[in-house]
Amino acid sequence: MGHTTPGRTVRIVAAVLLVAVEGLGLAVFATLDLLDLHADRAVLAIGTSLFLFAYAGLLLASARGLWRLQTWVRAPIVFTQLIQLGLAWNLREAAPPLSGLFAVVAGAVLWGILSPGTSRILAAVDEESRASQQ
């Protein structure tokens, strides 16, 4: 049986790039938080930075998985974008430009990963993977 799975669409590539940028942004933020370490908040800064580094790693792994058309990536990516939409809502009055940016990026990623075309491609990859295991 030959490889018949369709390739990556523009939506998938855009979602990969946006999720990768989110992951890199979190890693930069975590690094900046560590660089601004003060003795009175050292434990909080280190704990927060470790969490953000782990979250950034998950996003970067998810972006890589989506690039490889792996189906497991949908759940962490969708979960992250829903959190980002909530964050955008909370920032709507304090930082409207940032809030808008978060909302647009989350919407674009959700559109890219939940669109019917992407669902068909990931289902085809999953089916092909199951067929090759038999």
Image (cartoon, helix red, strand yellow):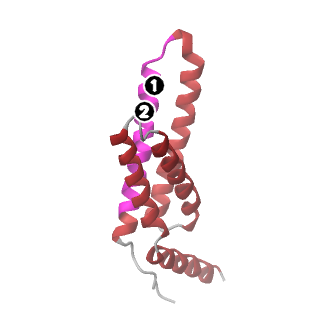
Mark seen at residue 29? 2
Q: Is residue 28 magenta?
A: yes
If the image is split into quadrants, where does the C terminus sit? bottom right
* Secondary element type, mark 1: helix
Which residue has dot 1 on it? 33
Mark 2 neighbour density, 10 Å: few (under 14) some (14–19) many (20 or more): some
Query: Looking at this view, is 60 or 76 the one in front?
Result: 76
**In the image, is residue 26 above or below residue 47?**
below
Q: Where is residue 94 in the image (x, y as percent from the top left)?
A: 41, 34
Query: Looking at this view, is 23 or 83 the one in front?
Result: 83
Residue type at mark 2 is Phe
Q: Furthest-right residue in view?
A: 134
Q: How far apart are marks 2 and 1 (CA)?
A: 6 Å
Q: Is residue 79 visible?
A: yes
| Total numbered circles | 2
- Name the residue rendered at 47%, 50% in the picture: 60
Query: Looking at this view, is 80 or 88 the one in front?
Result: 88
Q: Give the range drawn in magenta.
A: 14-38
**In the image, is residue 4 above or below residue 51?**
below
Q: Is residue 7 left or right of residue 86?
A: left
Query: Looking at this view, is 62 or 89 the one in front?
Result: 89
* Secondary element type, mark 2: helix
SS assignment for the magenta stretch, majority: helix
Q: Is residue 23 magenta?
A: yes
Q: Position of residue 82 (x, y in %)?
A: 53, 53
Q: Position of residue 31 (x, y in %)?
A: 43, 29
Q: Furthest-bottom residue in view?
A: 1
Q: Are marks 2 and 1 in contact (CB under 8 Å)?
A: yes
- Residue 107, image quadrant: bottom left
- Name the residue rendered at 56%, 68% in the picture: 71
